[in-house]
Image: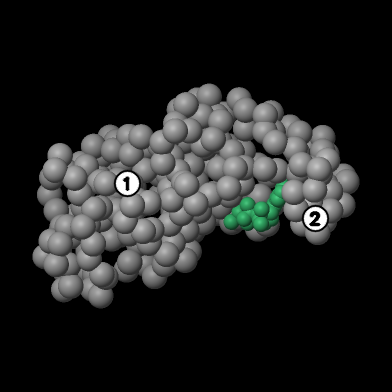
């Protein structure tokens, strides 16, 4: 894989066997969340629409397949992704979150796929990407609609073959991570506008979980308000399952 990149600080994250060392021990990149920094997935609300979402989370967590979470901003997509990981058989593994909208397009390749020493100016050592850090666990790709087109083929290869190639490298690296993606833009429109590869869309959209807007969830706004105002107060919480 070869992409023009510059100005990224290099870190060393490989063990002797070529695998990445745990992210938490090295300090996470700004856009990534190591699993141990994430609180347990608590979601409040008791509208029929949200209870249906809870059921879907419990059911989807058991399938080791990609999930696409759709819904407006603030509807809780990231919480759902966390809950899916925590309810899954991968719960003891890493839960790595990458926000595709939070990084300039030129940095996303290095962030996701890592790079080899000498891949670009400033790459003084090999560095693992977030996909490798998710090995054995879950990779959450937030705002997937912002994934640059030139990287989508590499992501597709990962989804299809379970392997990646670091930037500047040639050797494929096997990675076992479940992919959960989220979007607040309609991806079918992105496919129609040729901003998203159709084959990637179908690979990501194996299981779909739609989060209804708060205005369509009777009573949840009040519960959420209480929850925000008095986080942790007894009675306001509903832990999954
Ligand atoms: N059902 C819920 N229960 C508790 N907190 C929620 C719920 N839905 C959203 N939130 C909170 O609202 C904020 C936005 O949620 P987030 O998961 O980031 O939404 P999205 O990813 O869809 O934009 C977060 O602070 C989250 O904890
Ligand atoms: Mg979000």
Which labelled disc corresponds to residue 213? Answer: none
Question: What residue is shown at x 66% (from left), y 50% (from top)?
Answer: 76
Question: What residue is shown at x 44% (from left), y 61% (from top)?
Answer: 31
Q: State left or right for residue 93 relative to residue 173.
A: right
Image quarter (top left, top right, bottom left or bottom right) of the C terminus: top right
* Depth check, front residue: 201 or 65: 65
* Depth check, front residue: 121 or 106: 121
Image quarter (top left, top right, bottom left or bottom right) of the N terminus: bottom left
Real-space Cα separation, disc 1 to disc 2, in angstroms: 34 Å
Q: Is residue 180 visible?
A: yes
Residue 8: x percent and y percent?
Answer: 27, 70
Residue 217: x percent and y percent?
Answer: 82, 45
Which labelled disc corresponds to residue 230? Answer: 2
Question: What residue is shown at x 49% (from left), y 52% (from top)?
Answer: 37
Question: What residue is shown at x 12% (from left), y 49% (from top)?
Answer: 170
Which labelled disc corresponds to residue 22? Answer: 1
Q: Secondary structure at mark 2?
A: loop
Q: Secondary structure at mark 1?
A: loop
Q: Residues within 10 Å of mark 1 (few under 14, many from 20)?
A: some
Q: Is residue 88 above or below residue 97?
A: above
Q: Is residue 141 visible?
A: no
Is ligand 1 less than 8 Å from the beta carbon at label 2? Answer: no
* Depth check, front residue: 173 or 187: 173
Residue 138: x percent and y percent?
Answer: 43, 39
């Amino acid at each position: 894989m070869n992409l023009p990149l510059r100005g990224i600080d290099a870190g060393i994250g490989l063990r002797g066997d070529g695998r990445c060392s745990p992210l938490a021990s090295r300090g996470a990149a700004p856009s990534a969340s190591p699993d141990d920094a994430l609180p347990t997935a608590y979601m409040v609300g008791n509208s029929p629409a949200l209870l249906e979402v809870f059921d879907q989370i419990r059911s989807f967590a058991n399938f080791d397949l990609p999930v696409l979470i759709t819904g407006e901003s603030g509807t809780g997509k990231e919480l759902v992704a966390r809950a899916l990981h925590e309810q899954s058989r991968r719960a003891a593994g890493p839960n790595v979150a990458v926000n595709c909208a939070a990084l300039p397009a030129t940095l996303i390749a290095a962030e996701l796929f890592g790079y080899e020493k000498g891949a670009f100016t400033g790459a003084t050592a090999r560095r693992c990407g977030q996909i490798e850090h998710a090995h054995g666990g879950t990779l959450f790709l937030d705002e997937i609609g912002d994934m640059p087109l030139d990287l989508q083929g590499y992501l597709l290869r990962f989804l299809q073959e379970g392997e990646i190639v670091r930037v500047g490298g040639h050797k494929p690296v096997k990675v076992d991570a479940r992919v959960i993606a989220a979007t607040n833009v309609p991806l079918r429109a992105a496919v129609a506008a040729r901003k998203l590869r159709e084959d990637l869309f179908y690979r990501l959209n194996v299981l779909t979980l739609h989060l209804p807007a708060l205005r369509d969830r009777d009573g949840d706004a009040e519960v959420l308000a209480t929850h925000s105002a008095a986080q942790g107060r007894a009675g306001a919480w509903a832990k999954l399952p």
